[in-house]
Amino acid sequence: MSAVIYVPADSAALALGSDEVASAIAEEAQKRGIAVEIVRNGSRGMFWLEPLVEVQSGKGRIAYGPVEAKDVQGLFDVGFESGGKHALWLGLTEEIPYLRKQQRLTFSRVGITDPLSLEDYLEHEGYQGLRRAISMIPERIVHEVTESGLRGRGGAAFPTGIKWNTVLNAKADQKYVVCNADEGDSGTFADRMLMEGDPYCLIEGMTIAAFAVGATRGYIYVRSEYPHAITVMDKAISIARSAGYLGVDILGSGKSFELEVRKAAGAYVCGEETAMLESLEGKRGIVRSKPPLPAISGLFGKPTVINNVISLATVPVILARGADFYKAYGMGRSRGTLPFQLAGNIRHGGLVELAFGVTLREMLYDFGGGSASGRTIRAVQVGGPLGSYLPESQWDVAMDYEQYTAIRAVLGHGGIVVHDETADLARLARHAMDFCAIESCGKCTPCRIGSVRGVEVMDNIIAGKDTEKQIALLRDLCDTMLNGSMCAMGGMTPYPVLSALEHFPDDFGVAGVRHA
Ligand SMILES: Cc1cc2nc3c(=O)[nH]c(=O)nc-3n(C[C@H](O)[C@H](O)[C@H](O)COP(=O)(O)O)c2cc1C
Ligand code: SF4
């Protein structure tokens, strides 16, 4: 019998040499006459251990990592193909504390299955959600998603079921489901890992959405910097179609759904849902004014469900196990789990899926193991480039949408970017304004002009020119952007700027400045 060896083909593992490791294992096994089956799985999301090689044993999978091609001979010398001990031996994968302490619902298969094997997907609860959805009327599917408490994981946290209900009730000859896979937030990679590691899960979630609202076409708008995710999604769509899970009369339901991948335009603002629709229609990514909502008049003017990858990929488990199962996780109005992404200056970067309610301190130390530099952590930006900087005094706040709103912070897409004590928050605030100036779509004045003026004001503050007056100007400018911008690009750029000013006033050359 062949030894089954897992070598991830996720982009993070590939960047660290997993292709070379897989080739070295195949060559060495052949030389030694050992029969091996190499499965290219997704990543387990423990990036400091990548490439993480696993071997199947009677007790479960045994992990080795980080493995380089030059380690492969030594691994065979100790009989790693049957779990032999080695300096890189990590024991049972599932027992590694970083993984053991997680609650993986959306990511339950990622790193475990062969991403493109439909058989593997079916063996791991795949398509059970869709099978149940087929037996339900559309209103009942929407009700189940509403009851689960699922809220959009793309950033705005809008209740998914309510959005679907609007599309369901809209009368039209054509409706669409669009998956937002632009994943522009700094330090985030959950969408990419999901698409590369469990593509059928997203396809199943989109198909359930389509059946729920009466849509027959769907698009996945994937960040152009994700070539591997695009390839995996394209292949999975084609396999699913051949097997009757996409196309006409899916699984004999009488319902049809066609799905295509579209490569995104490469601008942060194209992740904003209406700019994304413009881009999908072949135009420049400029934000549309609302109303009308995309749920009423979206892609090509038709009712459109727009959801993030993680929102859609969470739908199969909700349908398969029921709303009550899902909503038993979490706290308050934040139900279920969020795949948090630890990045920046952190020792153990990676993906941590947990129920809402965990604290940032637990993330940083119990999972992250402190800073990568070994210095004290000073500021943490949560929720992408438009998220606030959190000082240590806020690290014990439960990570829940409402509790974060109460401290003028956001969870967004779950990105956590860590900075140590060498960080200069005034320069990071300048960067926020600069980022907005570069990425602004230009449609409204507070964002287009405000961000450029914001960079100038920050330059004056950093140079120590007339500091008090410039800070008053900065606050005024942020007030205009917060209240006058058409979308969250200009509307949220003040979050990193004002939080930096409030919590790290020394970096701005003043003490104890508070914003209103
Ligand atoms: C500037 C900007 C960029 C955004 N980028 C993304 C993105 O990359 N991915 C995403 O899912 N949502 C992004 N959003 C949020 C979307 O507009 C929208 O709320 C989301 O796709 C809806 O899906 P959800 O309800 O499942 O979260 C962005 C919003 C703004 C204002
Ligand atoms: S806030 Fe910025 S990105 Fe949004 S519409 Fe206005 S100019 Fe465009």
Image: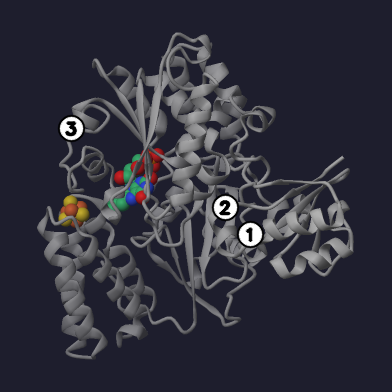
- Residue 149 located left or right of residue 498: right
- Residue 236 located left or right of residue 470: right
Instruction: Indicate which label's residue lies in the foreground, 1 or 3.
Output: 1
Colour style of the rendered protein structure? one colour
Determine the residue positioned at 45% across, 53% down: 403
| 315 up-or-down from 279: above or below | above
> Cα distance, mark 2 to mark 1?
9 Å
Determine the residue positioned at 23% across, 91% down: 464
Instruction: Indicate which label's residue lies in the foreground, 3 or 2.
Output: 2
> Which residue is nearer to you in this view: 329 or 468?
329
Give the quadrant of residue 213.
top left
Q: Secondary structure at mark 2?
A: loop
| 327 up-or-down from 344: above or below | above
> Cα distance, mark 1 to mark 3?
47 Å
Give the quadrant of residue 444.
bottom left
Q: Which mark is residue 292?
A: 3
| Residue tagged 2 | 10
Please report whichever mark, 2 or 1, sits nearer to the chain's N-terminal start: 2
Give the quadrant of residue 512.
bottom left
| 82 up-or-down from 392: above or below | above
Instruction: Indicate which label's residue lies in the foreground, 2 or 1.
Output: 1
Question: The N terminus appears in which quarter of the rendering?
Answer: top right
Dot 2 and dot 1 residues touching (CB under 8 Å): yes
Q: Residues within 10 Å of mark 3 (few under 14, many from 20)?
A: few
Q: Amino acid at mark 2?
A: Asp
Please report whichever mark, 3 or 2, sits nearer to the chain's N-terminal start: 2
| Residue tagged 1 | 18
- The image position of residue 392, as x and y in percent, is 51, 72
Q: Amino acid at mark 3?
A: Pro
- The image position of residue 418, as x and y in percent, is 49, 70
Q: Amino acid at mark 1?
A: Ser
Ligand 1 lies under 8 Å from the Cβ of mark 3: no
